[in-house]
């Protein structure tokens, strides 16, 4: 069963699964995007540093539409 179909068949289960998955997604996203920023900086690109993305803070890498799609559609 996909997450989106679970929303309509079991809304409470959908919310609970989101609450359980969200911390792992935020931590994984932070490390993943930080690694991209670090690699780009090491290769001579100053863009991540200038955009404030050279951090483990999840909100520096936060894209509301992308995160929403990731959580809804997996």
Image: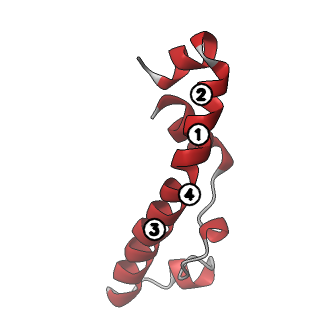
Report helix, strand or loop for mark 2: helix
- Give neighbour class at mark 2: few <14, some 14-19, many 20+ (Cα, 10 Å): some
Residue 59 place in picture, x, y as percent: 67, 66
- Give neighbour class at mark 1: few <14, some 14-19, many 20+ (Cα, 10 Å): some
Mark 4 or mark 1: which comes first in sequence?
Answer: 1
Mark 3 or mark 4: which comes first in sequence?
Answer: 4
Residue furthest out toward the top: 9
Looking at the rendered structure, the number of numbered marks drawn on it comes to 4
Q: Residue at x 55, y 60 (%)?
A: 26
Residue tagged 2:
14
Q: Residue at x 44, y 21 (%)?
A: 2
Residue tagged 3:
33
Q: Specify the quadrant of the image occupied by residue 62.
A: bottom right
Q: Residue at x 57, y 50 (%)?
A: 22
Above/below status of 71 relative to 23: above
Above/below status of 37 relative to 68: below
Residue tagged 1:
18
Mark 1 or mark 3: which comes first in sequence?
Answer: 1
Q: Are marks 2 and 4 in contact (CB under 8 Å)?
A: no
**Quarter of the image containing the N terminus?**
top left
Mark 2 or mark 4: which comes first in sequence?
Answer: 2
Foreground pick, 60 / 3: 3
Q: Is 42 on the left-hand or right-hand side of 64?
A: left
Q: Could you give the CA–CA distance between mark 2 and mark 1, rounded to whole angstroms?
A: 6 Å
């Amino acid at each position: 069963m996909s997450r989106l179909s679970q929303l309509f068949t079991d809304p409470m289960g959908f919310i609970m699964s989101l609450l359980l998955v969200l911390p792992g997604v935020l931590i994984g996203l932070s490390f993943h995007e930080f690694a991209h920023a670090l690699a780009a900086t090491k290769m001579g690109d100053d863009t991540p540093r200038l955009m404030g993305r050279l951090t483990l803070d999840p909100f520096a890498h936060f894209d509301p539409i992308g995160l929403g799609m990731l959580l809804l559609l997996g």
